Amino acid sequence: MLPDRTTGSALFADISGFTVLTESLRKALGARQGAEALSRQMEEVFSALVAEVEMYGGSVINFAGDSMLCWFDRGIHEIQASSSSALSAAMGMQNVMQTFSNLALKVSIASGNSRRFVVGDETIQRLDVLAGATISRTAVGEHLATKGDIVVDEATVKLLGDSSLIKEWREEGGERFALVENASTSSEQPSAQRGDAAALLTDYSILRPFIHHAVYQREISGQGSFLTEFRPCVALFIRFSGLNYDADDEVTRLDEFVQTVQRVAERYHGILLQITIGDKGSYAYVNFGALSAHEDDSRRAVKTALELRNKTELQLQMGITQGLMRVGAYGGVTRKAFGALGDDVNLAARLMTTAKENEILLSSDVHKAVMGQFTFEPHPPVPMKGKAEPLPVFAVTDEIQRRAVRLQEPNYSLPMVGRQAELKLIEEKLDLAKAGKSQVIGIVAEAGLGKSRLVAEMIRNAKRKGFVGFGGASSLVERRN
């Protein structure tokens, strides 16, 4: 386990091509078989990459979409060894990717000090977070890298002490990264093997806090892992700033924020999937529909965003989209994550970066789903990579408060037709209630099938029998209130 403060090398690896592969498999094989084929290929790819990381003594800290953050820790007195191990792993990863012709990889390496936080509500999920300037530099390097590249920061170049592999220098925002030539073999010797992961991870009391409680319960109940499938979901991305990760007391503020996000999301049946520390602010990814779907998931996501904006002192920027996403466990044999990925996830992240401080931007699909429930401000369309035209977006400001419930409204003048059986049953229940026997009547149907009309008729009949009516309104989202 890493200490609170440590020294080593961070490796950020980003795979491209899964989005195109996902769509082609879904079209060629259908949703179910396409998802199964995708799951098999993802496990094959990630298993090979994770094996290279672990071969050279590294650890996968977390996954973020189709990328992963790894750490090579040798301590302050052996940081040169950690940088060499990270580069050897990167070369091995690029060589492995040659066998997957439809995918590509870019790798960024930075060396120096880092902080390790464990944050989150233990009853929901604890999360490992690496933060600090070293981690932020890997994000800068990722921006400078293209498919097939390995780039390393100046600190790593100095530690390696070998400039013969450098092909060129690239710079962004005052940070310089060297493009390294990928050797077919590495002089670095693999570290001692860690042993069988399955044998090491048998103490579920240690694992439990780091696995979301719903995923954990599924695993231990014998239902198996969440297989990859395509599901309609809503993605909420939250960028937060105002934290100095090198300060001692900031871990408490980060933990408080993460727990707030988890608890609010949990109340609306959402799940916090990722916490990522980046060079231009950090972000959280919350998903609705990945674990359990609801017809009003869009509304739940918007209410979550509004509540978080009111509950934290941090500056937030948020983006919300909805669409078909690939959902399930993914990763390698020894390291997996539960996620929900797809084009609409990327769009939510784009809207988040476009939003101003404390602004919540919705895609047109989400806006359509929640129209009439929230108030909005006009917002100019957003240009999007790969899209011919700018996309319409909407800035949500607040929830529309419900008006008071008025029984017998609207007042229907024409008699009811075609509900004789239901009306007869209601009459019987009212008579039993009048005789002192408590009754409950539930009316359930799809929208537009006449529930309101039948309720109005029931109220009218109850008043005729001398009952006094009381009304209330609620939704599944506020069921605890």
Image: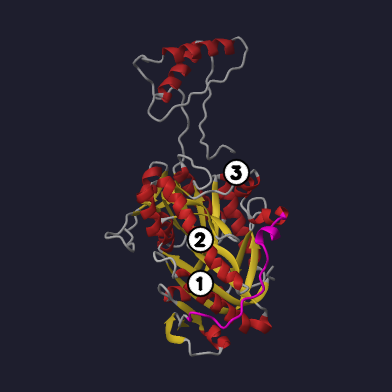
Whether 196 is drawn above or below 395: the answer is: below
Disc 2 to disc 3, C-alpha distance: 22 Å
- Give residue 69's position: percent from left, percent from top: 55, 68
Q: Which residue is mark 2?
A: 44
Whether 80 is drawn above or below 269: the answer is: below
Give the amino acid at mark 2. Answer: Glu
Q: Mark 1: few, some, or many residues within 10 Å (few <14, many ≥20)?
A: many
Magenta residues span 183-203
Can residue 14 be seen here? yes
Q: Which residue is mark 3?
A: 223
Lower sequence index among marks 2 and 3:
2
Callout 2–callout 1 Cβ contact below 8 Å: no
Give the amino acid at mark 3. Answer: Gln
Give the amino acid at mark 1. Answer: Met
Element assignment for label 1: helix
Q: Mark 3: few, some, or many residues within 10 Å (few <14, many ≥20)?
A: few
Element assignment for label 3: loop
- Give residue 451's position: percent from left, percent from top: 43, 24
Q: Which residue is mark 1?
A: 93
